[in-house]
Amino acid sequence: MELKTKIHAEDGQQDLVITRDFDVPRALLFTAYTDPEIIAQWMGTRVLKLESKRHGSWQFETTDAQGNVVFRAGGVIHEFIPDQKITRTFEMENTPFGPQLEFLEFEALPNDTSRLRMHIVYRSVAQRNQQLQLPFAKGLNMAHNRLEDVVRPLK
């Protein structure tokens, strides 16, 4: 099956461009990235902190059935323009990956659909390539599929 979330990675570059079209209006797509309850549903994680504003910070955490933390990530929001743009840092704890810079742009398309464009900048080409060795594309596509399933009924 073809993945709906597209990842473009040029050789020798330390960034990725990710695009995905969603069958939901732009405002609803933006809400899926800024509402803690909706984020928890589509990401399957707890939102420990989410200050959706310029200079705000965020932290998400996932635990296993025994309550052990298996994933924790956080960062700082540098730019926040409602329904249009979020610029933030992203850093996973206890991994070899360093912080990355993410530019998320939300575009309205015809017929109440929308597009998410993510430009992610890594510290190095090696770090970006290491990320791509993981099932990153498949996982991101699965998460975006869940996002659409969660927010589509809210249209």
Image (cartoon, rainbow, N blue to C red):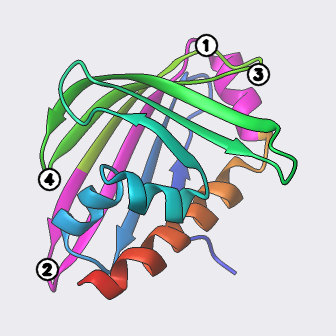
| Amino acid type at image mark 2 | Pro
| Element type where label 3 sits in the image | loop
| Element type where label 1 sits in the image | loop
User: Separation of disc 2 and disc 3 at Cα?
Assistant: 40 Å
| Element type where label 4 sits in the image | loop
Determine whether 64 is above or below 74 in the image.
below
| Amino acid type at image mark 4 | Asp
- Write down the quadrant of residue 148 in the picture: bottom left
Q: Residue at x 69, y 48 (%)?
A: 136
Q: Position of residue 36 (x, y in %)?
A: 38, 51
- The stretch of residues the image draws in magenta is 106-132
User: Separation of disc 3 and disc 1 at Cα?
Assistant: 15 Å
User: Separation of disc 1 and disc 2 at Cα?
Assistant: 37 Å
User: Separation of disc 3 and disc 4 at Cα?
Assistant: 31 Å
Q: Is 17 within the magenta?
A: no
Q: Earlier in the sequence, mark 1 or mark 2?
A: 2
Q: Earlier in the sequence, mark 3 or mark 4?
A: 4
Q: Nearer the viewer, residue 126 or 107?
A: 107
Left/right placement of residue 62 relative to residue 27 reads: right
Q: Residue at x 17, y 81 (%)?
A: 112
Nearer mark to the viewer, of 1 and 4 = 4
Q: Which mark is residue 105?
A: none
Q: Earlier in the sequence, mark 3 or mark 1?
A: 3
Q: Is residue 12 visible?
A: yes
Q: Is 110 within the magenta?
A: yes
Q: Which residue is mark 2?
A: 110
Q: Position of residue 104 (x, y in %)?
A: 32, 42
Q: Is residue 5 visible?
A: no
| Element type where label 2 sits in the image | loop
Q: Earlier in the sequence, mark 1 or mark 4?
A: 4
Determine whether 49 is above or below 4 in the image.
above
